């Protein structure tokens, strides 16, 4: 019975972390290019494998809160830039029909997006991967069987990766501006959550508060679009 | 040089005041260890930055 409980606990706890990583990888891939995003995933997985192989059980000595603070702050800073531009576009304050401006902006963005997609995917996967490794080590050590904890985490990985592959194609059909708005909201949400947590704040319900942070960022963003949209002149 | 420009655009972007405000808000959040402070600060900072940009 305790073996089933261990596999299930490891599956659920690792699954939550993997869903967070998947969200970030999807956001980076859709907005900045799949090649760079997947390269980021590959590089982070390689670094993670080296860290786990070298440190082994000493892995728990890594200051994960400091890492959360740095990664969260960078995601928040970058995500807010996306959100700001998306709100300006949606409220009509940034060029939408000016083709020259769009072309110049697209060229400039394309140059930086590839590298940004890599960095975002890399950081997200490295941080969440370390958290999964922590979960497997702590759950496995506490219950006396690391292989069973690994089995739970591996099952979660198969499920989450499958979901990622399944939703990739439908997401690609969503309009570009909507995607950019959503990416800005997701990065800002994770940035707020991780940087506050890394700074020592405790969210009520821990990761269960993430959907509420997401809802708050959504409401604020949509409210700002509405507030900034120029009021139409009343007919004479 | 392009390395520095990449990180400048990644971290600071179009509005240095917004970036500085976010860093300050994270510092105060860490100092007070209050979870509610950062979401509110982000909302206010975004509002101020957008109003300035929309002018």
Image (cartoon, coloured by chain):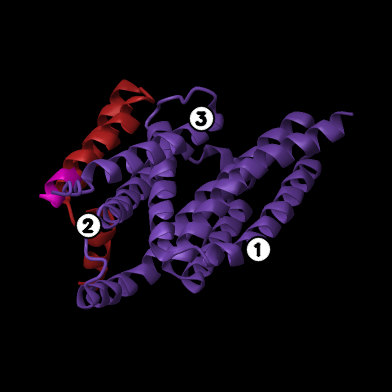
Q: Is residue A118 above or below residue A183?
A: below
Main structural element of the magenta stretch: helix, strand or loop?
Answer: helix
Report, in whole angstroms, how far the alpha carbon at label 3 lies from the one at label 2.
Answer: 29 Å
Task: List x then y, in percent, for residue B35.
Answer: 39, 25
Can residue A225 be seen at all in this image of the molecule?
yes
**Corner quadrant of residue A118:** bottom left
**Mark 3 / mark 1, whichever is N-terminal:** 1
| Residues beneath discs 3 and 1 located on the same chain | yes
Q: Chain of mark 1?
A: A
Residue A96 location (% of width, % of height):
26, 66
Residue that numbered label 3 is attached to: A209
In which quadrant of the rendered view does residue A12 lie? top right
Q: Position of residue A220 (x, y in %)?
A: 34, 37
The residue that label 2 is drawn on is B13
| Residue range of the region highlighted in magenta in the rendering | B49-55
Q: Residues within 10 Å of mark 1 (few under 14, many from 20)?
A: few
- Which residue is at 79% across, 39% downward? A7
Q: Is residue A144 visible?
A: no
Q: Which chain is purple?
A: A
Name the residue at 57% across, 56% down.
Answer: A48
Q: Is residue B10 above or below residue A75?
A: below
């Amino acid at each position: 019975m305790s073996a089933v409980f261990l596999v299930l606990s490891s599956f659920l706890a690792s699954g939550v972390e993997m869903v967070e990583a998947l969200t970030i990888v999807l956001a980076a891939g859709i907005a900045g290019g799949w090649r760079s995003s997947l390269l980021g995933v590959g590089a982070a997985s390689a670094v993670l494998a080296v860290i786990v192989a070298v440190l082994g059980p000493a892995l728990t000595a890594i200051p994960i809160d400091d890492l959360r603070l740095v990664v969260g702050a960078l995601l928040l800073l970058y995500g807010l830039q996306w959100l700001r531009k998306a709100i300006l576009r949606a409220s009509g304050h940034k060029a939408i029909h000016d083709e020259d401006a769009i072309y110049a902006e697209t060229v400039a963005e394309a140059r930086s997006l590839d590298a940004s997609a890599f960095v975002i995917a890399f950081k997200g996967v490295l941080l969440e991967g370390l958290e999964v490794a922590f979960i497997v080590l702590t759950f496995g050590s506490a219950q006396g069987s690391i292989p069973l904890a690994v089995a739970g985490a591996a099952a979660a990985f198969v499920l989450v990766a499958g979901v990622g592959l399944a939703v990739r194609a439908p997401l690609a059909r969503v309009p570009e501006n909507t995607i950019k708005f959503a990416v800005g909201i997701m990065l800002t949400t994770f940035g707020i959550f991780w940087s506050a947590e890394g700074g020592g704040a405790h969210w009520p319900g821990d990761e269960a508060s993430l959907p509420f942070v997401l809802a708050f960022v959504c409401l604020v963003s949509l409210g700002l679009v509405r507030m900034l949209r120029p009021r139409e002149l009343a007919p004479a | 040089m392009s390395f520095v420009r990449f990180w400048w655009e990644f971290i600071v972007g179009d509005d240095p005041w917004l970036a500085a405000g976010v860093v300050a808000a994270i510092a105060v959040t860490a100092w007070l260890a209050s979870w509610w402070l950062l979401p509110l600060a982000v909302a206010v900072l975004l509002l101020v930055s957008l109003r300035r940009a929309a002018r």
